Amino acid sequence: MSNKVITIERHIIEQERASNGATGDFSALLRDLTLAIKLINRDVSRAGLIDILGSTEMTNIQGETVQKLDEFADGVIYRAMDHGGHLCGMASEENEHILPIPDEYPKGKYVLLFDPLDGSSNIDANVSIGTIFSILRRVTPEGGDGTKEDFFQPGYKQIAAGYTIYGPSTMLVYTAGRGVYGFTLDPSVGEFLLSHNNIRIPEHNSIYSVNEGNYHKWSEGMRNYIDWCKKDIPEEKKKAYSLRYIGSMVADVHRTLLYGGVFLYPADVKSHKGKLRLLYEANPMSFVIEQAGGKATDGQGKRLLEIIPDDLHQRTPLVVGSPKNVDEVERFLNHS
Ligand code: P6P
């Protein structure tokens, strides 16, 4: 590893130089987003010390009680991103409708979708949580407000996507379509420094990550897959897999990216589309995993990034991880 200190700002600029036709807009957008993430990190890391734990009496569009940190993070990202002139609109898990850019600011050529604080139900237990973001190029004429058309694009159209995991260390992982890069925050200088260059997901690992509490609600194929995971099958030279489940998607997918294996949130008899949101959870995480050499499907054999959205908050089943692990799952589900 060279002893060069590469900040995320330097990396973004070098990535943009590598892409022809770059205008610097995109670099500036990601830099603004990085500032917002540093501000969120500051308050997440001391949440236990200041009165922003606990729930507000408010609820978000999902009907979930909004944790104060969720609200705070949502506002920080909006205010950091509304004036740079790079966006024509935003959408977030915490807001039912598209968030317009204030009239006093220019409208840009991108839209930003984000889950400001994923895994928020874990905040009070000090479990790792995360911020997830997805960037699309607008498809409507430049100048005006972004419309639904700009947001309802399949995931393979993403220009960039990534997440921050607020854990033992704070790490930002992103892709701009040319590989996956991880940056660890050095709190002593307040900079994200390149720590994981060109991350590649292992082809396979004997780890599966799912909430088994939903077992009896799954399809027969999914139940057969989970039963198979737990078995030693000497004739197939297969040992039982390990179950790892944190309950924060960012943490579970980040572990899957680095160690391999598969993360699943399947559909079930109660939630026919599963629980996870397509536009600002499944799409960005799937883009990262695919860029690292992994796979992501909807559990019915369809590539996740090819789903055409028709609602900002639509849910999707998700199977994401090492290519050979995802293929194992699909073999069982296509038999169901
Ligand atoms: P369950 C967190 O609330 C979240 O949206 C994801 O981060 C996580 O993967 C999932 O829900 C956990 O859901 O039903 O297993 O508690």
Image (cartoon, rainbow, N blue to C red):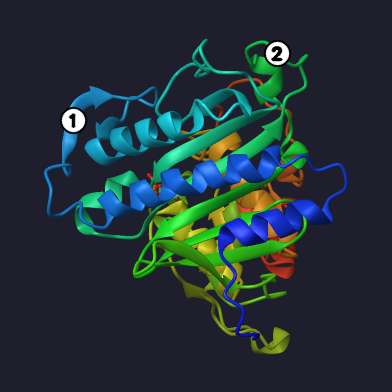
Badge 1 crowding class, 10 Å Cα cut-off, few under 14, some 14 to 19, many 20 or more, is some
Q: Does label 2 or label 1 sit earlier along the sequence?
A: 1
Camera-nearest residue between 193 and 175: 193
Residue 283 shows in the view: no
**In what element is the residue under mark 1?**
strand
Q: Position of residue 77 (x, y in %)?
A: 43, 36
**Residue 235 — which label?**
none
Q: Residue lying furthest right in this view?
A: 20
**Residue 143 — which label?**
2
**In what element is the residue under mark 2?**
loop
Quadrant of res 126: bottom left
Residue drawn at the location 71% of the way across and 42% of the way down:
24
Residue drawn at the location 86% of the way across and 42% of the way down:
21
Q: Position of residue 300 (x, y in %)?
A: 71, 44
Cβ at disc 1 under 8 Å from ligand 1: no
Cβ at disc 2 under 8 Å from ligand 1: no
Query: Between tags 2 and 1, which lies in front?
Result: 2
Q: Position of residue 191 (x, y in %)?
A: 45, 62
Badge 2 crowding class, 10 Å Cα cut-off, few under 14, some 14 to 19, many 20 or more, is few
Tag 1 residue: 56
State whether residue 82 is above or below residue 129.
Answer: above
Residue type at numbered disc 2: Gly
State whether residue 267 is above or below residue 294.
Answer: above
Camera-nearest residue between 35 and 273: 35
Check the picture and name the quadrant holding the N terminus: bottom right
Measured in 3D between alpha carbons, the distance from the residue under mark 2 to the one under mark 1, in whole angstroms, is 37 Å
Q: Is residue 319 left or right of residue 274?
A: right
